[in-house]
Amino acid sequence: MTQQTMLTNEQALNLTVVILTFNEERHIQRCLESLNGLASRVIVVDSQSTDQTREIALKLGVDVLINPFINQAIQFNWALDHSDITSDWVMRLDADEIVTLKLAEQLRQHLSSTPNATAGITVNRQIHFMGKWIKHGAIYPIRTLRIWRNKQGRCENRWMDEHILVEGTIEHINADIADINLHNITWWINKHNHYANREAIELLVGEINHAVDNKAAAMSVSARFKRWIKHSVYARLPLGMRALLYFLYRYIFRFGFLDGWQGLVFHVLQGFWYRFLVDVKVYELRKLMSERSQPLTQVVKDEYGYDIS
């Protein structure tokens, strides 16, 4: 199901934006409107939404493709392989994110003149929670690689914490995308419960395979450092205790308390509860593997329905 985009004008950049969606009728119009006049093409890849996501996107004139969802990495790479992208640049944007006016202005000023050696561009990401921009606790600014030259970037094949990998140098634009999710806290908790499944799987896969991240050179510096901390420091700490230490680091030592009541809720839930839940799921999966004398692949398939083989 496709339709020629109407979000272009003569000032639009030679840029294709790819957005993955599932039941995003609350966010998709806002997201697409932030791209108005900026991108020469916008592609929505929908995971069989049951709401009005596709209808809203089509009404706004973007291309809509439909593909069953397995995980973020597989879905995004499917989009790259099946949407016939011909622009010079590609951008990844989530449906609950927007491109800020400053970022749009910076892209218009600098994208066409970016050196040929530059393969990828990082931007800052804002996270808004319960109506408040969370600025402390090592949450902002986090640099994320969201823009790359066509054919020079691909999403790494991971179940969680996947990044775009590029072949070439990476530059930074000091402007933001903003993650402003409008769902309630119950939705947020359910979403992070599913994230915890995938994060636990990813941690155990790395443990079992004694994984060495040989793709780190293709990441941005900030993503590379974060991955190193996660696998070389955090993963070596005791289950449960590391979640508490991480929360204290964020909330006390990185001044998360300055984000007020919403910040307290965010840092407790995302910095402690979520990380603790991941550890509980790691413990449970290890226990099931031992009790059943089964490999991780079989236990994950039986318990979560994921085929990670």
Image: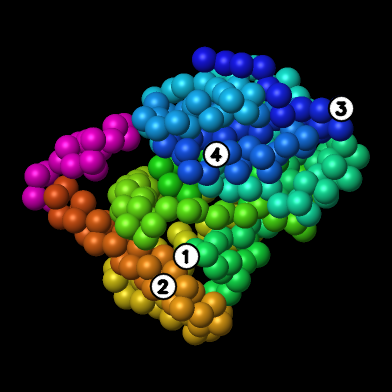
N-terminal-most mark, 1 or 3: 3
Q: Which residue is mark 1?
A: 130
Residue 170 screen position, x and y as percent? 75, 47
Q: Write down the residue under mark 3.
A: 10
Q: Is residue 191 magenta?
A: no
In magenta, the rendered stretch is 290-309
* Observer-nearest of 7 and 230: 7
- The quarter of the displayed image where residue 81 is located: top right
Q: Secondary structure at mark 1?
A: loop
Position of 81 compared to 261: left or right? right
* Alpha carbons under labels 1 and 3: distance apart: 38 Å
Residue kind at label 1, given as amino acid type: Met
Mark 1 to mark 4 CA distance (whole Å): 19 Å
Secondary structure under the numbered disc 4 in the rendered image: helix
**Badge 2: how crowded within 10 Å, few (<14), some, or many (20+)?**
some
Instruction: Give amino acid for label 4.
Output: Ile
In the image, taking residue 111 as reference, residue 276 lies left or right, namely left
Q: Please say if the residues under marks 4 and 3 sit with CB atoms less than 8 Å apart.
A: no
Q: Which mark is residue 265?
A: 2
- Disc 4: which residue: 28
Question: 113 or 35, which is in the foreground?
Answer: 35
Residue 260, given in percent of the width and then of the height, sits at 51, 80
- Tell me which secondary structure the magenta stretch mostly adopts: helix
